[in-house]
Image: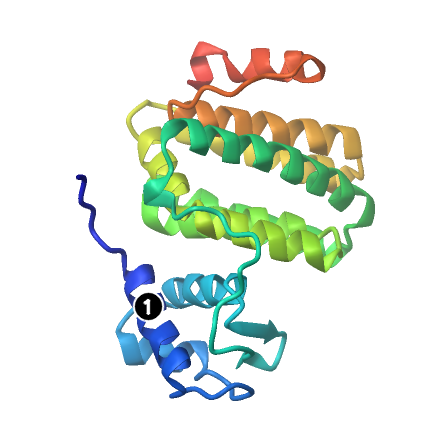
Amino acid sequence: MRTRAVTLTEQVTRQLRADIESGAYPVGSRLPTGRQLSEQYGVSAAVIREVTEHLRSQGFVESRQGVGCTVRSRTGSAGFQLPREPDIDASGLADLYDLRIDLEGAAAALAAVRRTDEDVAALSALLQRLRAHLYDPQPAADIDAAFHIGIAAATHNPYYRQLLQYLNLQLHQAVATARANTLRQAGLAETVHAEHEAIVDAIRRGDAAAARAAAVTHLQCAARRLGLVLRTRADEASTARVASSPSLS
């Protein structure tokens, strides 16, 4: 039987969930602010964001802009949930990246049509932060997740944002691993950054087809950097050829 370390996110999620189930935080009450929870558990704001997203996806809390997290149930929802990342084998992870390709490709295309100047500015700011942390895997992984969620936010469809936020946070460790892998090959970090820039450039220009293609290419390349084998589809053959290029593996 394999063993694994319990992450900080899992530890805090379990503790908060236990408090909700015991009634320490009654239904209808608000959880402490993100800053308060960070201080209480001695973890970063990024960890707390992941924790509250896990609790939201499990049906324990609901979150609203400017209000924070409110307890909605003392028992979790039996709705759709992804398996915990450490329990996903290579085949399952490849299937999840296959799902990301479809969802995030569509989100990028829609973002290109609906984006505002503020959306473009926010994505550009995230690109600048990514550029500043190209060789620092952990901050880069956090910013990377925020970048993909920012694209979803630019669709101005809250369900895209909520679903892709959940998906990206569930795969946070895979993103961190991919980021660490890029440092093992000279110039690969710059290649990854260029993939992100291509997505934002297409969104900025309002080119939905180019935005979709750039997002698909980036995620297929990201999957290959993790050593995953994706089942390509005929209508993506040209993109798959780009993803299989030795320079991007």
Q: Is residue 12 left or right of residue 247?
A: left
Q: What amino acid type is highlighted by mark number 1? A: Arg
Residue lying at 43% horizontally and 86% vertically, measured from the top left: 25
Quick one: 209 or 24, which is closer to the camera? 24
Viewer can see residue 170: yes
Vertical placement of residue 180 versus 213, above or below:
below
Vertical placement of residue 127 versus 202, above or below:
below
Which residue matches tag 1?
14
Which image quarter: residue 64?
bottom right
Q: Position of residue 216 (x, y in %)?
A: 62, 28
Q: Residues within 10 Å of mark 1 (few under 14, many from 20)?
A: some
Quick one: 23 or 9, which is closer to the camera? 23
Residue lying at 62% horizontally and 80% vertically, measured from the top left: 66
Which image quarter: residue 240?
top right
Q: SS of the residue at dot 1?
A: helix
Q: Say which quadrant the N terminus sits in.
A: top left
Vertical placement of residue 49 versus 235, above or below:
below
